[in-house]
Each structure stands twice: as C-alpha cells, then as structure tokens.
Amino acid sequence: MTREEPDTREVLDAGRVRALRADFPLLDTTVHGLPLVYLDSGATSQRPRAVIDAEVDYASTGNAAVHRGAHTLAHLATERFEDARATLARFIGARDHEVVWTSNATEGINLIAYSFSNAARGSRFAVGPGDEIVVTEAEHHANLIPWQQLALRTGATLRWLPVDDDGIIDPAAIGSVINERTRIVAFTHVSNVTGAVSPVADIVAAARDAGALVVLDACQSAPHMRLDVAALDVDFAVFSGHKMLGPTGIGVLYGRGELLDEMPPFLTGGSMITTVTMEAAEFLPAPQRFEAGTQRISQAIALATAVDYLDAVGLDAVREHEAALAARMVAGLTEIAGIRLVGPGVGLERVGLAAFDVDGVHSHDVGQFLDDRGIAVRVGHHCAQPLHRRLGLTSTTRASAYLYTTADEVDTFLDAVAGVRPYFGVAS
C-alpha cells in the first residue's frame, strides 16, 4: 500500500501561516512580557485546538475500555480507537494491522530490540556472536542504546556508519560497514541535530543485499515530509505523536505485517492473548500481540486528528515552508561572527532546524539569553552525545521550526543570536 497525499496545492505563504497560528492557543503566550517565539518544535510541537478538543471530547462523551466490553459505549470507543489506527496507517502508506500503538518512538525501538532478543535461535530475528547490528554515528540515544543493549545481551557486535566533520553520514562507508554479517540496520531518517536527511535508498539497498532487517527512526521526518514506508522499503519505522501536533504519551511502530506476526511479544498480559491456561498462553496476531494492557485511547484519537490536520495543510506545503525557514536560519547564522553551524551548509537540504555553537558562550547561557527575550530553543547534546563528541562539541543550541513558524520569528531569533557574544563580552 502506498501513501496517498490529499490533493492540496496551497502553499504556506505568510497569510496562511498567520491563519494557521490562530488554531494554536499556546502561541498567544507571552514570556517575560514578550510575545513567545517558539523554536523548539523538534522536541515537542504545539497542538492545534482540534487536537486538544479531540481528547476532551473523547473523555467527555466516549470514555470506555476498548476491545473488552460488550456495551454500546465500549463498542463505540473501540471503533474510534481503530479508526485512529486506520488513519495513521493511511498516513504512512501501511496496512491497518501494521500499526502498533506505543507510548513513544523510544518504546517502539525497545519493543523491536527486546522482541529480537526473545526470538528463538534460528529465527530471522535472532542475533548472536558473529552477527552485526549497524547504526550510525548520528543517532539519537533512543536509536542507539537499545541496540547497544541487544548486542550486550546476545553477543552480537555493534557497528556504525561514520559521519563527516559536518555530522553528515558518509555514503562511501555504507558498503564497507554493512556486510554479510549484518542482521539489523537501524538509522535516523532525519538527524535531530544536523537536520540532514539520510541517504535512505543507499542504506536500504545495502541492507537488502546483506539480507538485514531495516529499522527507521522517523521522529524528525514524519511531522515534516511525506512518509511512505512501502516506497522507502523499510521493515520497521517509529515516530512520536508529540513532535507532530499530537499529545504526549502516544507513538507509532510500523512493521511489515508478516514480520510482526512472527515476532515474539515484548510486553505480556491482558488484551494480547487468545487462550490462557495456568501453564501457557497463546497470543493474538499483530498489532494486538504488542498492545498489552489498557490502551492510550484518547491519545490515539487525538494523534489521528493531528494527522488529519497535517493532511489538510499538506505535507508538501509544510516541507516547502520549512525549507525556506531553514535556508533563512542557515544564511543568517553563518553571517554572525563566532557562530559555528552544524549540519548541511547554505544551499544544501535540511529540515527546518539548525543547531549551532557560539564561540566562548555555553549553550545553556545562550538558551537563557534567548529565553529572556521570549525565544524558546533547545540546548544541550539533544540526546546525541556521540555525534557531538565526533563534532568536537559538548553541546549546541538548536532552533527548530514548524508549520506555524513565521519568517519574522526567524529574524527575531537571528537578531537575538547576534547579540549573544557582545552581551557576554566575548565578541572579537
């Protein structure tokens, strides 16, 4: 099944962005008496009123257990819950039973890794001594530590694709790192630090040649561009709702249906079984075999509402808008003395985020300076310590835009950054 994009050719010009901003109540907030400039959507995006209302409406009019009761309210709640799953499946070009609800992408990756370590010897999911797991040097900790732990539990070897001095994955290394011993290749679609889009086709092709399974971290791509898992030819993909206009506490794990049905479950208990005796249990097929316990019902419904909102805006329009904002940020930052931009340079593709180092000023101080001016950014290592270490940095400041970000906000941010070094007395 391939992803069908709604037929929308409307662009996100300044007028439309202003209109969209009216849907987001929090954007009217003031910080220290100044209008909020929210540039931390890469960590957590804001929610439109429709998404907020979806959770309130469910709690007010439809709250009941799903897949458990025979009464009308339970039946209607189950319908809404499964309709949400179908919406997410369409959004990524998957089949309904290939979408598993999780708490977030981190849980989704851990689910895969622990399921693999529970697999019987000889299974296509089992790894052990002599096998290799490949990640990249650009990974978020959520797509690194679970694989480190799987290697420790099983005796497999963890290897990684290196990045260059700009933090970009080196395509020339793909063929030498991914080889006949590779069983799993897990990598980010878009770096949460550099904003660079990974060479997905090249990595997937090498993994297929090696007979390896492919896991895609789509946290920074699903909110910003069309995500078609069938076209990308990945076996698994994960992303989180709170980065794409949805609530916290909800994530999505995509897996090929035939793989999910063969994988041993990770969490066990109610709602994922067919028959239980005092000696044994039999498990439901996917996705229910991976959804033990009471589900994230209101969150799933709200995430589906967020997806409907994104579809109505148009992912192509979102990507084009963010590309323009990214170009504006990159051009502006590179013109400020003492700023080191990480990731793709001027004129190169990146999503709408930019991380940078201010010479002589710690990122935490930069963040506080910007916050005093009403500008919200992310500071630190962004859960990517190995990447920062490779770049010779301990931390960076990251500004990340979204569909509701304006060019004027980017300019306000750039003007403020230009004042950081003079304020701290380190300007040359």
Image (cartoon, helix red, strand yellow):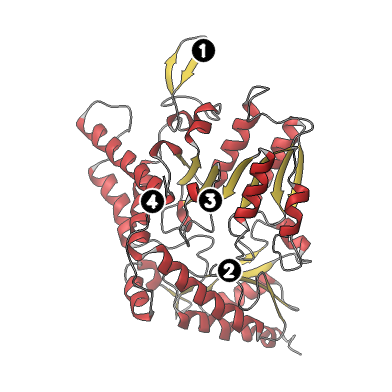
Circle 3 SS class = helix
Q: Nearer the viewer, mark 1 or mark 3?
A: 3
Q: Which residue is mark 3?
A: 232
The alpha-carbon separation of the residues under discs 2 and 1 comes to 51 Å
Q: Earlier in the sequence, mark 4 or mark 2?
A: 4
The alpha-carbon separation of the residues under discs 1 and 4 comes to 35 Å
Q: Residue 62 or 19: which is nearer the viewer?
A: 19
Where residue 80 appears, as percent x and y from the top left, is 29, 41
Q: Earlier in the sequence, mark 1 or mark 3?
A: 3
Q: Nearer the viewer, mark 4 or mark 2?
A: 2
Task: Give amino acid for label 2.
Answer: Arg
Outermost residue on the bottom side: it is 428
Circle 4 SS class = helix
Q: Residue at image x 28%, y 46%?
A: 58
**Which image quarter: residue 387?**
bottom right
Task: Give amino acid for label 4.
Answer: Leu
**Which image quarter: residue 428?**
bottom right
The alpha-carbon separation of the residues under discs 2 and 3 comes to 18 Å
From what the image shows, is residue 174 above or below residue 280?
below
Give the number of callouts. 4
Q: Which residue is mark 4?
A: 303
Where residue 343 appears, as percent x and y from the top left, is 66, 69
Q: Which residue is mark 1?
A: 280
Circle 1 SS class = loop
Q: Residues within 10 Å of mark 1 (few under 14, many from 20)?
A: few
Q: Earlier in the sequence, mark 1 or mark 4?
A: 1
Q: Which residue is mark 2?
A: 350
The alpha-carbon separation of the residues under discs 4 and 2 comes to 25 Å
Task: Give amino acid for label 1.
Answer: Ala
